[in-house]
Structures are given as C-alpha cells and as structure tokens.
Amino acid sequence: MTDKLTPAERTEMIDPLLQSGWQLLDGRDAIHKSFVFKNFVEAFGFMTRAALWAEKWNHHPEWSNVYKTVEVTLTTHDADGLSALDAKLGAKMDTLAGD
Amino acid sequence: MTDKLTPAERTEMIDPLLQSGWQLLDGRDAIHKSFVFKNFVEAFGFMTRAALWAEKWNHHPEWSNVYKTVEVTLTTHDADGLSALDAKLGAKMDTLAGD
C-alpha cells in the first residue's frame, strides 16, 4: 500500500512539477504532461527509458503516443490519488526528456 | 503520398484484420485494437518491437498503454483514411503479439 500525499508533502513534491509543465487533472487526483520531441525516435526513446524506471519502481504511467508527442498521466491506484511515487516518476521523466 | 484503399483492396487487406480483433472506428476511417498482455514488461516489449517496424516503414500508430493493455489506432493521415500501410502494420502487430 502506497500512501496518498499529505498536504505538506504535496506542496513539497508536486508543486515543483507544476512549475515544469505538469498539470493537475480535473476530477481525478492525478498529474498530466505533454512531452513533445523532434520525431518518433526521440519520443519512443523517451518512453523506453521511462518504461525501465517505471518497471524498476513498479509504478507505471498511463500514457499515449502519436508520432512525436507523448501524453503522460500519473496517479497511484493503490492510494486513490497522488503518492510519492508519482512525484518521483514525474521528476524522472522530466530528467529523461531533458526538461 | 499514400493512396487510400479501394473497396476491393479493403476487402482483401482490412477484412482479415477484422477477423483478428481489429474494429473499424465510428466517424473516422481507422482501425482499432486492444492488445492485452500478461504484464507491463510484455506490453511494453510488444510496443518496442512494433515501434521498430513503425519507424522502418515510416508509418506510426496512435497508441496508448496502461500497465498490461495497449490500445492501437491505425490510419494514414496522408491518405485521409486507411491505406495499405495500415493493413501491413496491423498484421505485423498481430504477429508480434502472438495473435
């Protein structure tokens, strides 16, 4: 069981992501970001790197890809909302994307 | 420019896909299939293999992944509908998925 973030933890962990292009979703305790790359190879390369971290941490994104764009939604089903794992994976994805 | 399939070509190339789980979308000349695997590793492994063919053929899917499920939509923007490339990539994906 992964714990949902407390208000103080949200400020600490989620607020920085909201400064780097992540947005809170309406109607769901989740964050979303659109990553746009130069082409499909760059976009899918990003997905592949992120997939390895997702599997390593046993925390997987909801994501879609159309050519050079990757749309990512992060939430924690076990916690019924955002957990520290979402913050960690979001930050890692920013690093992998060079954001 | 890739040509949109003629009615005869659709019967030849698309009908077999409709027998293997692909469906025509409403309101869009496109085909869609949900692939369900054992886990994320299997699902993303399938995406990786399919991505290499997509790039090789310069024909890319619209697709999304949530854990062990991969949803794929194929259409050809250049042709404003289904082309031979969609039939080819759809059949390749079936093979890669073991369907």
Image (spheres, coloured by chain):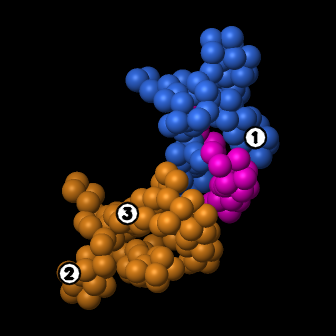
Chain colours: A blue, B orange
In this orientation, which residue lies closer to the viewer: B96 or B83? B96
Residue at (72, 53) in percent of width and height: A56
The CA distance from mark 3 to mark 1 is: 28 Å
Q: Is residue A35 magenta?
A: yes
Dot 1 alpha-carbon crowd within 10 angstroms: few under 14, some 14 to 19, many 20 or more: some
Q: CA distance from mark 1 to mark 2?
A: 48 Å
Q: Is any atom of residue A36 visible in this view? A: yes
Write the residue at 26% across / 88% down: B12
Quarter of the figure with residue A13: top right
For label 2, the residue is: B7
- Determine if the magenta segment contains residue B87: no
In which quadrant of the rendered image does the C terminus of chain A lie? top right
> The disc labelled 3 sits on which kind of residue?
Ser
Between disc 3 and disc 2, whose residue precedes?
A: 2
In the rendering, at what x and y percent does residue B77 appear?
Answer: 41, 62
x%, y% of residue B27? 22, 54
**Quarter-of-image position of residue B54:** bottom right
**Above or below, comparing residue A22 to residue B77 in the picture:** above
- Toward the viewer: B34 or A57? A57
Quadrant in which the N terminus of chain A is drawn? top right
Quick check: B63 left or right of A56? Answer: left
Q: Which mark is residue B34?
A: 3
Q: Residue at x 69, y 17 (%)?
A: A9
Residue at (65% x, 49% y) in the render: A58
Q: Where is mark 1, residue-wise? A: A92
Which residues lie in the magenta part? A30-59
Inter-mark Cα distance, 3 to 2: 25 Å
- Between A8 and A37, the residue placed more toward the observer is A8
Determine whether the residue tagged by mark 2 lies in a helix, strand or loop. Answer: helix
